Amino acid sequence: GDWTEFELLTIPHNNRPVVNIADQTVEINTSLDISTAISVTDDDGDNISRYIIKDATSPNSFYVNGINVDATNNYEFNASELNTLRVKGDPSVSSQTLQIRAYDGLEYGGWT
């Protein structure tokens, strides 16, 4: 039969965003603003639009907009709310592992 033409468009691979934050120290039952300790790099220069936070051991460690959020099964919030992110030291443990990752409009990066 006759030849059919089509155009094949290629798009560059998306580099997922990477969240950077150093270990933090907070007193028991005290909250700490960690928003300024968080930085994100995205090699594509994509804008970060969302974050997910997670705390597998204690549901009451994160605060967003002054409201305690249950992050045991992930809690997603807008990037515009990052400046309100706080953590609270849990009285039942001496060390907590909290996680965060960022969304660049295409993909979430890995957990930090």
Image: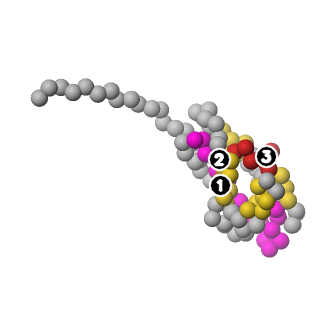
- Could you say where residue 67 lies in the image, as x and y percent from the top left? 79, 60
Residue at the spot of label 3: 83
Q: Which residue appears at 55% of the width and 45% of the height?
A: 107
Residue at the spot of label 1: 76
- Could you say where residue 10 lies in the image, as x and y percent from the top left? 41, 30
Describe residue 18's horizontal placement relative to residue 13 as left or right: right
Quadrant of the snapshot with the N terminus = top left
Among the two numbered marks 2 and 3 on one chain, the one whose residue lies closer to the N terminus: 2
Describe residue 33's horizontal placement relative to residue 9 as left or right: right
Residue 24 visible in image: no
Residue at the spot of label 2: 50
Distance between mark 2 and mark 3 Cα atoms: 12 Å
Residue type indicated by callout 2? Arg
Front position in the image: 84 or 97: 84
Q: Is residue 109 above or below residue 53?
A: above
Residue type indicated by callout 1? Glu
Quick one: label 2, few (<14), some, or many (20+) residues within 10 Å? Answer: some
Q: Is residue 99 magenta?
A: yes
- Could you say where residue 18 lies in the image, as x and y percent from the top left? 63, 44
Describe residue 59's horizontal placement relative to residue 29 as left or right: left
Q: Which residues are magenta?
A: 87-105
Q: Which residue appears at 58% of the width and 41% of the height?
A: 105
Distance between mark 3 and mark 1 Cα atoms: 14 Å
Quick one: label 1, few (<14), some, or many (20+) residues within 10 Å? Answer: some
